[in-house]
């Protein structure tokens, strides 16, 4: 399938193609969190499932809601709103959990993030992504990979490896093994 | 036909490593001057197989090196050479060397040849030097250095080859061997079927034939032996250089009762012989006598490499598993029959059936778990060698006692406990046992004893490392600890606490740093590794008498018997092994210290009360002691009463790691999935006690500044 065909089929599938996208384009899965659209590399997404109750883990940060049984493995669930210090909302029918494969050190872990709802899938050329501006101390830029413009609006592309590793997770892990 | 040699290489390497382990353990048992034929033969056979395989799979460095070792061993085996300490040490070094070579072969890299070259030179020197050795007596088979003759090229060789009846059963093909021989030169063979029994008595898989062959061509004895290398132990093989051309067929006239005519197709075995009417033989005098011992590599003695990913399972265990599955199938069919024509009157039967199913499942689970259990001798095996080496290094005399080697524990635990044990044993050797003169001064026997003991206790395996050395000098430790700022001066510490300091990072009391121990990394790592396995380690010591390190480990990491407890909406699992008892709280037995810490008087003990909801910051049904239940638990040698709202069922749970996708959490040892698919957390009792006391671990509490982490 040549490029033109692919674009066409993508369009047919309702995927908006960035007009600049080339060979090193990546696909983003975007989701909505407090009215903003965030994106993650679609290859890191293992599955998307509806919200279900979790088993809370004592003495862990608030945004770690707990763990669930994902077909026999224990997977932690992070509430992204709480992680970003946003107001929490009551989980509704659109609330979903996105299961992500997170790379840390030498292994891959599976984690779930709770978001308000999934939005779309975009093709994005690598050079269409702008580096994030400095947010100062409000929010660490570490876990923002870049900002992408899709059509008229902005998508915040997350670096999930940093997001789900940094700060408290890593620190606590150090305490546990050190 | 293309054969994937890689898989055979892997097997070869695995088997060779086992062979080396075997050699090592027998070498260690070998006393200088001894004539323990079994041991020597075992060692020889191991070396022999390694050599043969090495040549086959193209590891020429291994086969060349092992060849020299084998030569020396063969002389010992034939009684031409005494077993000397020097030889034993050299062999042990060779074992290490070959092990390295195999490791390199496994990794696919190129090994550093200098070590093997040097060792080989030493072995050669020994071969030549020894006065017991008379070079002209019998040049040993396979001894290229000692018998230069073999290297010599003769133009004609006579070969008499008489396989033992069972040789074909081991997969050796006579045709192939003769074909190879034929490649070396002009080959004439005669088959001798005098021993062929009547057709009715014929064992179809046995070989009754023998061959005479004459080989004309430029080749060495080595070349010929190479062809027979795999069957050396399974045949009578005589290879002689034909003195002259005419004499070549004069040999052996006696038993070659018959002729060269093909004995076609009497049975599979003889078929082989027949095709080969063109073999040839050749000279030189090496009767490979003695090789008659069947090469039973005594499976029992095989030792799997601790790191290998395969596991050898006792056939009994498999059989019991199969039985169990059989029963399960029966139960299943009974239940399905019941289901087809069910009416309420048969409810009782259904209950019985379900009960049986439960029993079957549990038994099945237990036997599956047993498959993973291997005797601790796998971990103990390395110690005789280590002690041997360390004795030489330190000039100490130490005797190693092993007991409870058949105690079984989970393979995963086994693999991870090896290194900590090595550390503890080294420590016992280095710091514990004194030098012989010091021991004599102290009125103790010159030879010290290190005793490794393993046994089961409850759901744990206990490993004790006891030495009768100098013991641990508590004052010295305390001084050192104060010096390092680990403890504040003037603080009174109990003996146990002081001993506990040994497990602090960066702590060492050795006056001098040796390359064995004393760098101060070690004991803390030991403790950490053992704790990571859910175990504990502690030490008891008496000055002048010795020390005892006790390691406690869970039998398996995969399954535990748990007590489900409820606090508010949360269900937790307490490992049954750590529960002492459960009771209702009577307020009169509750005492508070400084209005804060609560103690419960349980008979003649006071145990601290841990309110689980406080430790975990969750909402309970009731905050009053009297409405809850107190589960008295013991962890890390400490007792505590956990306050819970309710006790639920007891059940076996499969432990799932929290660390796989998350991280370790203090107070929890893992999670499990309950029958309804929800996740329940498993309490780490010792951890909960620590959390409730507001400290992360022991050493923080003794820290000079006393800041709880």
Image: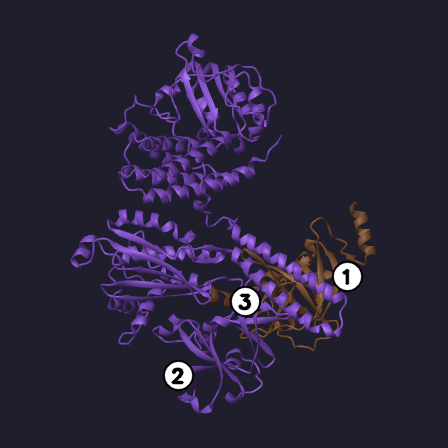
Q: Earlier in the sequence, mark 3 or mark 1?
A: 1
Question: How many neighbours does mark 3 have within 10 angstroms: few (below 14), some (14-19), or many (20 or more)?
Answer: some
Calculate the distance from the C-alpha at mark 3 to the C-alpha at mark 1: 35 Å
Q: Which chain is purple?
A: B
Q: Nearer the viewer, mark 2 or mark 1?
A: 2
Question: How many neighbours does mark 1 have within 10 angstroms: few (below 14), some (14-19), or many (20 or more)?
Answer: few
Q: Quadrant of the C terminus of chain B?
A: bottom left
Q: Nearer the viewer, mark 3 or mark 2?
A: 2
Residue located farthest toward the top when viewing the structure as drawn: B246
Total count of labels: 3
Q: Quadrant of the N terminus of chain B?
A: top right
Q: Nearer the viewer, mark 3 or mark 1?
A: 3
Using the image as rendered, state which of residue B238 and residue B582 is in the foreground. B238
Q: Position of residue B676 (x, y in %)?
A: 66, 71
Letter of the chain that mark 1 sits on in the rendering = A
Q: Position of residue B419 (x, y in %)?
A: 40, 55
Residue located farthest toward the bottom when viewing the structure as drawn: B588
Q: Position of residue A174 (x, y in %)?
A: 48, 65
Using the image as rendered, state which of residue A79 and residue A67 is in the foreground. A67
B592 versus B370 height, above or below: below
Q: Quadrant of residue A162?
A: bottom right
Q: Which chain is brown?
A: A
Calculate the distance from the C-alpha at mark 2 to the C-alpha at mark 1: 71 Å
Left or right: A96 as drawn, with respect to B318? right
Q: Which residue is mark 3?
A: A169
Mark number for residue A151? 1
Q: Which residue is mark 2?
A: B606
């Amino acid at each position: 399938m040549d490029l033109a065909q692919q674009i066409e089929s993508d369009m047919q599938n309702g995927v908006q193609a960035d007009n600049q996208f080339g060979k090193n384009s990546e696909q983003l899965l975007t989701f909505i969190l407090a009215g903003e659209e965030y994106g993650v590399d679609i290859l890191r997404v293992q599955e998307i499932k509806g919200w279900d109750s979790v088993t809370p883990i004592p003495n862990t940060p608030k945004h770690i809601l707990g763990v669930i049984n994902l077909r026999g493995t224990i997977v932690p669930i992070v509430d992204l709103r709480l992680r970003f210090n946003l107001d929490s909302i009551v989980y509704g029918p659109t609330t979903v959990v996105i299961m992500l494969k997170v790379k840390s050190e030498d292994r891959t872990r599976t984690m779930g993030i709770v978001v308000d709802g999934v939005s779309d899938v975009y093709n994005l050329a690598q050079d269409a992504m702008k580096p994030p501006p400095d947010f100062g101390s409000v929010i660490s830029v570490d876990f923002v990979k870049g900002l992408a413009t899709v059509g008229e609006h902005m998508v915040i592309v997350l670096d999930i490896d940093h997001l789900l590793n940094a700060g408290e997770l890593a620190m606590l892990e150090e305490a546990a093994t050190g | 036909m293309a054969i994937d040699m890689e898989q055979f290489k892997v097997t070869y390497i695995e088997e060779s490593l086992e062979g080396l382990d075997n050699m090592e353990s027998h070498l260690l048992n070998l006393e200088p001057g001894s004539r323990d034929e079994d041991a020597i033969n075992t060692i020889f056979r191991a070396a022999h197989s390694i050599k043969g395989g090495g040549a086959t799979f193209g590891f020429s460095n291994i086969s060349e090196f092992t060849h020299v070792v084998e030569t020396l061993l063969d002389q010992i085996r034939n009684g031409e050479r005494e077993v000397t300490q020097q030889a034993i040490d050299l062999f042990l070094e060779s074992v290490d060397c070959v092990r390295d070579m195999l490791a390199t072969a496994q990794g696919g890299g190129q090994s550093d040849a200098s070590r093997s070259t040097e060792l080989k030179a030493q072995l050669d020197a020994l071969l030549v030097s020894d006065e017991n050795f008379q070079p002209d007596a019998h040049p040993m088979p396979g001894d290229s250095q000692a018998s230069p003759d073999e290297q010599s090229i003769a133009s004609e060789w006579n070969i008499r080859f008489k396989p033992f009846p069972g040789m074909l059963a081991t997969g050796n093909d006579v045709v192939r061997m003769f074909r190879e021989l034929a490649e070396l030169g002009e080959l004439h063979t005669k088959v001798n079927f005098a021993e062929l029994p009547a057709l009715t008595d014929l064992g179809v898989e046995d070989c009754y034939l023998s061959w005479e062959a004459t080989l004309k061509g430029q080749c060495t004895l080595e070349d010929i032996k190479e062809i027979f290398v795999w069957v050396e132990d399974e045949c009578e093989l005589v290879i002689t250089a034909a003195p002259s051309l005419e004499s070549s067929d004069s040999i052996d006239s006696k038993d070659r009762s018959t002729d060269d005519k093909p004995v076609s197709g009497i049975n599979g075995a003889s078929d082989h012989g027949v095709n080969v009417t063109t073999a040839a033989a050749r000279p030189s005098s090496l009767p490979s006598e003695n090789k008659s011992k069947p090469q039973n590599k005594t499976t029992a003695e095989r030792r799997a490499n601790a790191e290998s990913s395969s596991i050898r399972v006792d056939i009994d265990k498999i059989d019991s598993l199969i039985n169990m599955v059989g029963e399960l199938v029966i139960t299943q069919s009974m239940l399905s029959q019941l289901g087809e024509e069910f009416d309420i009157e048969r409810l009782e039967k259904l209950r019985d059936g379900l009960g049986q199913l439960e029993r079957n499942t549990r038994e099945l689970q237990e036997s599956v778990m047993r498959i993973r259990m291997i005797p601790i001798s796998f971990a103990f095996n390395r110690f005789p060698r280590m002690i041997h080496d360390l004795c030489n290094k330190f000039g100490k005399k130490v005797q190693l006692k092993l007991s409870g080697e058949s105690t079984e524990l989970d393979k995963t635990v086994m693999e991870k406990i090896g290194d900590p044990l090595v550390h503890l044993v080294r420590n016992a050797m280095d710091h514990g046992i004194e030098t012989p003169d010091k021991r004599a001064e102290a009125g103790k026997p010159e030879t010290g004893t290190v005793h490794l003991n393993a046994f089961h206790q409850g759901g744990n395996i206990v490993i004790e490392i006891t030495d009768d050395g100098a013991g641990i000098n508590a004052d010295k430790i305390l001084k050192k600890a104060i010096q390092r700022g680990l403890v504040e001066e003037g603080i009174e510490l109990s003996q146990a606490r002081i001993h506990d300091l040994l497990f602090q990072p960066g702590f060492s009391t050795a006056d001098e740093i040796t390359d064995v121990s004393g760098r101060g990394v070690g004991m803390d790592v030991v403790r950490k590794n053992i704790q990571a396995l859910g175990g504990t380690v502690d030490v008891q010591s008496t000055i002048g008498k010795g020390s005892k390190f006790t390691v406690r480990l869970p039998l398996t990491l995969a399954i535990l018997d748990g007590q489900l407890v409820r606090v508010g909406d949360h269900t937790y699992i307490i490992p049954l092994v750590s529960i002492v008892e459960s009771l209702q709280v009577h307020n009169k037995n509750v005492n508070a210290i400084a209005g804060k810490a609560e103690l419960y008087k349980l008979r003649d003990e006071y145990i601290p009360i841990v309110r689980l909801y406080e430790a975990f910051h969750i909402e309970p049904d009731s905050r009053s002691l009297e409405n809850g239940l107190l589960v008295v638990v013991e962890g890390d040698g400490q007792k505590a009463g956990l306050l819970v709202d309710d006790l639920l069922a007891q059940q076996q749970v499969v432990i799932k790691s929290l660390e796989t996708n998350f991280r370790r959490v203090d107070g929890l040892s893992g999670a499990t999935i309950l029958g309804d698919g929800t996740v329940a957390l498993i309490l780490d009792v010792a951890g909960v006690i620590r959390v409730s006391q507001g400290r992360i671990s022991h050493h923080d509490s003794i820290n000079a500044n006393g800041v709880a982490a």
